[in-house]
Amino acid sequence: MTINRVRLLSEQPSSNRDRDDSFALGLYCGKVNTPQLFPYPDALDDESKDTVKLMIDPFEKYFREVHDASQCDLDEKLPKKSIEVLKELGALGMLAPQEYGGMQLKRTQYARITEIIGSFDASISVFLGGHQAIGYKGIVLFGNEQQKQKYLPSLVTGEKIAAFCLTEPSAGSDANSILSKAVLDDDGKHYILNGSKIWISNGGIADVMTVFAQVPFKKDDSDQQSQAVTAFIVERDFGGVTSGPPEKKMGVRSSNTAAVYFDNVKIPVENVIGKVGEGFKVAMHILNEGRYAMGAAMTGAMRMFTAKTIEHANNRVQFGQHLIQYQSIQEKIAQMGLSHYAVESVTYAVSNNMDRGIKEFQVEAAISKIFGSESAWNVCDECIQILAGMGFMRENQVERFMRDIRICRIFEGTNDILRLFIALNGIQYAGKNMKELQKALQQPISNLGTLWDQGVKRSKRLIGIADSQALLEVTAPELSDCAKMITQRVEEFGATIEKLLLKHGRDIIDQQFILNRIANATIDIYSMAAVLSRASKAISSKLPTADHERLLASTFIEEGCDRVEQNLAEAITKRSLDRFDAYSSIAKEVRENEGIATTRPLRF
């Protein structure tokens, strides 16, 4: 995979100031950037908080009294009644501007409602997200006024349903390789679209679709034919649009997922979203915008798993004691609480920063998506383990959630690709900073300040001195040791990145064993910082849960620092690099054997 393939995920503008203040990107230069995380972000004013508070009871009542998630899972469809009540609640237009009939919720308000949905039924999350978070999001973000006036009013009310059509049989994470093609007609007034899309959420029920296709064109300076991805608004009523049957899925079974086929579909030229050739930027911006919401849904699910686990552990008696009295159960429950607190801290830090107008959030949003989806899976697994046979039964519903949340590590960017995205974006940022230092070396007098800062930094790094002042100044005194530990890991992280760049240069983009460990370290350090910030704010605000949050933070950070140390060591030590070579050799032999390559113990 080349850097061009992975950078596709970040084709959206951001200011240099935002990039320089990004905590996640700063790690790659060994910097502790506090402005975007400390104090813990809070972008909602009192009126915004009151608005979302008023929405909580109606949404919870809907799931308790109207929507039967278990029955929908068995029926593999959402009943008309459930959808109609969602429309009445305004759920299909939560993110759309008010001038077109939407509620225009801030991302943090939307995250709080998404929490509720995630704690009851992931299929509803997929239906609503496929409709508004990605389905018509391109019109909101990039559509012109005419497009917005024509399409948004009927979409935000749910009169029409939207879908996001990107994935194809030959193009999943590598979206630039899509084969669907839209060719400008001879009259110059229409594009003729042909192709197919697979696994499209709402694909069988959508009336309006955001569709991505290759558009042929000639470059200004060449007669050679080229092509570029372009985004279109496609109506089913245009004709030539058909859908396959609903897919039979492991989870989120009541959401509609289907293939969509386009056969000589005539699309008016005015239905291009943005500009011709900018479709990839549109797609990636939409996906980057929505990833934080998955973390919010996962926090709702994790809260529910923990409550079910506690109820069972408090009441179940084995060997004369309640389960909660056993240390092995206590450890599992503690890890549930730690995971939830950390994921919630990351999710709301990202959503609040987006609401503050910060444009550089792609890496942080990817962290939120990976961390939330994987933590929720682990918490769900432990919930079932503690509930034992009861957890395996359909009646308890946790098995449904396990089937449902498994998709979260796959769609909207697989976690594997997003790890590469995180590491490569950070390394690219570090590389640019190293180039600036190289320029400064060519003119040392005029760049004395830059050289002095970098020289001091490197001398500190070489003798093992970690400057924890930046974090100490914004951290509650009760958590000062945690601030020092995080800063030390940031210093080690920056030093590791520098070693890797000096050793591999541009070839680092092909070192996926290393990049995955760098990404894991990034996720841990960012999560620790978000937790530290939130717990510090709880302490300074004298919240009744401050002591508990301090304990959560110190425990999570202590464990996180150990994981970072291990991942950084694995990125550079010879022992680990030899093991990576062994992984490649083992995979090669298994591939050549088209399966397991060993001899059976019985030899037949």
Image (tube, grey):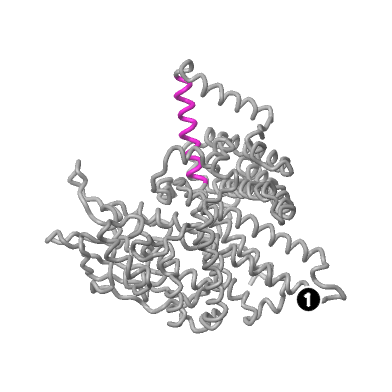
Residue at the far top: name it: 445
What residue is shown at x 56% (from left), y 71% (from top)? Answer: 57
Q: Nearer the viewer, residue 311 or 333?
A: 311
Residue 51 sits above or below residue 490 on the image: below
Question: SS for tag 1?
Answer: helix
Please tell me whether residue 435 belongs to the stretch shown in magenta.
Answer: yes
Q: Can residue 592 be seen by looking at this rendering?
A: no
The answer to whether 296 appears left or right of 137 in the picture is right
Tell me if 572 is positioned left or right of 4 in this view: right
Q: Quadrant of residue 161?
A: bottom left
Instruction: Give the residue drawn at x 62%, y 81%.
Output: 394
Mark 1, other Cα within 10 Å: few <14 / some 14–19 / many ≥20: few
Residue at image x 60%, y 43%?
571
Task: Look at label 1 and name its amino acid.
Answer: Asn
Tell me residue 146's x, y (percent): 25, 60
Q: Which residues are magenta?
A: 423-442
How many numbered dots are placed on residues in this image? 1
Q: Position of residue 337 (x, y in %)?
A: 69, 60
- Residue 581 or residue 336, whichever sits in front: 336
30 relative to 198 in the view: left or right: right
Closer-to-camera residue (157/181): 157
Q: Position of residue 26 (x, y in %)?
A: 54, 39
Query: Does residue 208 appear in this view?
Result: yes
516 within the magenta span: no
